[in-house]
Amino acid sequence: MTEWNKWQTNNGEIPVSPFAYANYHPHFTLTNGFGIICSKKKWIGTQVLNAKNNKLLGTIAHHTSWGCNYDCPRGNSIKAFALQAGLEILAPSTPTRFGTNSANTIDFAIVKNFLYPYEIHSISELSSDHNPITLNFFLQYSIPKYPGKLKTNWKKFKDTLKNSEFINPHFVNTAEHLDSIVCRLEDEIINAKISSSNPIKENYIYHDSKLRELNSERNLARKMFQTYRDPVLKRKLNKLNKQIKKLDQKIETEAFTNELLNVNATDGTVWKYVTPFKKKTKSIPSLNGPGGIANTDLEKANFLAESLETQFTLNNITNPDTEELVADSVMRFRTEANSVCKDFDPRLPSEVLDCIKSLRINKAPGIDGNNNKMIKNMPLHTILTITTIIHKIMTLGHFPTRWKTATVVPILKPGKDPTDTTSYRPISLLPSLSKIAEHLILKRLNNYLKENNVLCTEQFGFREKLSTSHQLIRVVENVTEGFANKQKTGAVFLDIQKAFDRVW
């Protein structure tokens, strides 16, 4: 069966000419070069025109809405029918047919209730004055995340977490199971946040009526000049552009002046106005590296990652005796770890709550996306789950892999070359839940070290109620004592490069 016979079989009404046939699809309709509209079930041409204006058949339809230079009665009829029937006209951005002194778009598509993304292009064909058209529909796609601001109903957030499927970490016996429980908990929190949040409508931006009128005149003048290339139209276009620029600057200056006049120190508006100027975040320029120049975000990220990997490579301090001693100590600790952890005081929900209360809501979240405000609004049964997970971390001797993964943000060092990858300091953003677990574990480890006198008395760093100031006082006392006893005091100061990255 030929395609024309298939068309006659599938359609109730038959066009006058077989040239009116166009390809069809269950979801959309297409037109051919003569502007004839066709669909799978019924030929739409008879619905567009009545008996007295059926001259549309076999002729070309022009309208500015799909890229033509002018409107014709046939194009107006198609456009009116599309508006009345709720159809959408798809046309390429470049002309599809080129005449001696003109270029027009006479090929287009019509869709209805078709929400998939699409691309339509006019392909240059040198052997003909009529270009072929490609129309691609992307039937598989992912909806991007909403980039605007969201407003969360925190009561609904708590209720959603309360009614979520219960996560019981009491029966966790392996490190892999602990990792899966942590990932599941994070997903439950994120899903509760999404289900209880709605986008905030943006404030309507008022545009001056005179400016809108000038923009419309400018757009029309540009279109006419591009079509006819008349110098008079060019002068009119330039004049309108100058008027728009002058009026836009005037409106912007007036708005800025009014904003400054309304700033008041008593109601806090002055701080809201000044805060954006204090931000030091800047975009990273093109970076120089061993592999060339990085311009895109992906190339910059790879360059910075390679630089950080080089900086964090450990120094070669190989010593067989020391390595054997460390290996024996680690093995001995692992053997005694279970008994040591069992001697620790059990984690209490009240301790977790105290840590949560001390969190600051303006801190950036980690890779899990759970910010501190979400943690502060968690229900009690979620707090109990976190407490049990921390207990399992201590008993199993395994810290969840997810909580050890950080988002690294490069910050330019003051006075350094912004194009050099080594000029950036990495800031690691860890999950907030991991910080709570670390705080409770560190508290018990410090108590153990203090009670058993494990640390030497000369260590002042990373110890409670001790700092470098106390170490300086100790050095001054030793020097003063040496002077009093008529002795000489010697001191050796070491400044180790990348001490934290490669040594500590």
Image (cartoon, rainbow, N blue to C red):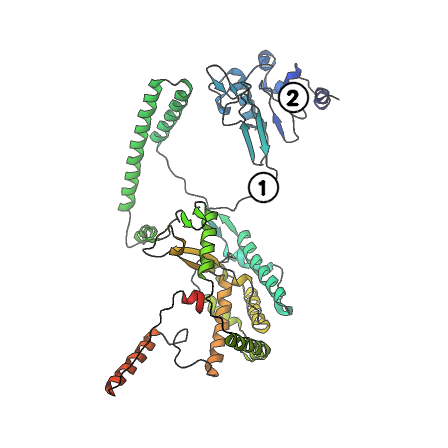
Give above or below for 470 relative to 162. below
Would you say 1 lies left or right of 125 here? right
Q: Nearer the viewer, residue 475 or 57?
A: 475
Residue 360, position as x, y percentages in the image: 42, 62
Looking at the figure, which quarter contains the N terminus?
A: top right
Q: Residues within 10 Å of mark 1 (few under 14, many from 20)?
A: few
Q: Which residue is mark 1?
A: 141
Q: Quadrant of residue 496?
A: bottom left
Identify the secondary structure beneath mark 1: loop
Residue 220, position as x, y percentages in the image: 40, 23
Q: Nearer the viewer, residue 339 or 370?
A: 339
Q: Quadrant of residue 245?
A: top left
Nearer the observer: mark 2 or 1; the answer is 1
Would you say 202 lies left or right of 280 here? right
Residue 373, position as x, y percentages in the image: 47, 59
Mark positioned earlier in the residue sequence (2 or 1): 2
Give above or below for 13 relative to 245. above
Q: Which residue is mark 2?
A: 43
Q: Tell me which residue sits at (49%, 53%) in the image.
A: 152
Instruction: Name the kind of residue labelled 1 in the image.
Output: Tyr
Residue 491, position as x, y percentages in the image: 31, 77
Cα distance between the residues tagged 2 and 1: 31 Å
Q: Residues within 10 Å of mark 2 (few under 14, many from 20)?
A: many
Q: Is residue 362 visible?
A: no
Looking at the figure, which quarter contains the C terminus?
A: bottom left
Instruction: Name the kind of residue labelled 2 in the image.
Output: Trp
Q: Tell me which residue sits at (48%, 51%) in the image.
A: 302
Q: Tell me which residue sits at (41%, 73%) in the image.
A: 462
Residue farthest right in this picture: 1
Q: Nearer the viewer, residue 215 or 336?
A: 336
Q: Is residue 475 visible?
A: yes
